[in-house]
Image (spheres, grey):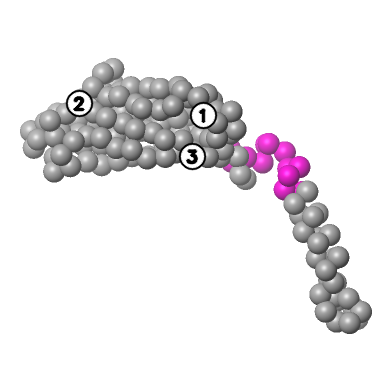
């Protein structure tokens, strides 16, 4: 009985291992784009899950996102909310949403008055050219938002 991958000497045959690895790489490279993770929720429904039926007003929030992104794998994102961050007036949560990634809710950040200022910075992945929306829930129950668009030349989030 002969074991696949072993040569006549009983050792691993380098050519068979390389051929198998090349075949696997080719199969991964040629997989259809449809193999990407399907989007199960819309952006609007994710925003409604975050804010409920409360009205969302424009203002008080600013989104710092580069307008042109060379690589969607690591995109810098900054969000600032105008708030004194006192016990009486502070930001409770910030939700970040997108239009085309597999999951529309990028992140939900929880803040406290002790944070000092309502400012966050991170990096996100973007599947394609799209709009990013940040919504801040204030301690008085109001919701404020801002959006920014990014053109992505090399997409991310396409693994399946």
Q: Is residue 111 visible?
A: yes
Task: Kindly state the secondary structure of the residue where label 3 is placed.
Answer: loop
Residue 2 occupies which quadrant of the picture? bottom right
Task: Say which residue label 2 marks.
Answer: 82
Task: Say which residue label 3 marks.
Answer: 74
Front in this rendered view, residue 50 or 20: 20
- Rounded to the nearest angstrom, the CA distance separating label 2 from label 1 is 27 Å
Q: Nearer the viewer, mark 3 or mark 2?
A: 3
Looking at the rendered image, the quarter that the C terminus falls into is: top right
Looking at the rendered image, the quarter that the N terminus falls into is: bottom right
- Residue drawn at x 66%, y 41% as measured from the top left: 35
- Rounded to the nearest angstrom, the CA distance separating label 3 from label 2 is 26 Å
Front in this rendered view, residue 49 or 73: 73
Task: Say which residue label 1 marks.
Answer: 69
Residue 33 occupies which quadrant of the picture? top right
- x and y percentages locating residue 134 in the rendered image: 34, 28
Q: Residues within 10 Å of mark 2 (few under 14, many from 20)?
A: some
Q: Residues within 10 Å of mark 3 (few under 14, many from 20)?
A: some
- Rounded to the nearest angstrom, the CA distance separating label 3 from label 1 is 9 Å
Q: Are marks 3 and 2 in contact (CB under 8 Å)?
A: no
- x and y percentages locating residue 22 in the rendered image: 79, 55
Q: Nearer the viewer, mark 2 or mark 1?
A: 1
Q: Which residues are magenta?
A: 27-39
């Amino acid at each position: 009985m002969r074991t696949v991958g072993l040569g006549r000497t009983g050792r691993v045959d380098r050519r068979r291992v390389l051929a198998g690895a090349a075949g696997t790489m080719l199969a991964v490279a040629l997989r259809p784009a449809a193999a990407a993770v399907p989007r199960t929720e819309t952006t609007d429904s994710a925003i409604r899950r975050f804010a409920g039926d409360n009205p969302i007003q424009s203002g008080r929030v600013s989104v710092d996102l580069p307008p042109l992104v060379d690589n969607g794998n690591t995109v810098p994102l900054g969000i600032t909310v105008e708030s004194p961050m006192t016990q009486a007036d502070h930001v409770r949560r910030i939700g970040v949403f997108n239009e085309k990634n597999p999951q529309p809710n990028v992140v939900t950040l929880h803040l406290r008055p002790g944070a000092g200022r309502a400012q966050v910075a991170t990096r996100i992945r973007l599947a394609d050219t799209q709009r990013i929306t940040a919504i801040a829930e204030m301690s008085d129950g109001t919701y404020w938002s801002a959006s920014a668009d990014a053109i992505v030349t090399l997409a991310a989030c396409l693994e399946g």
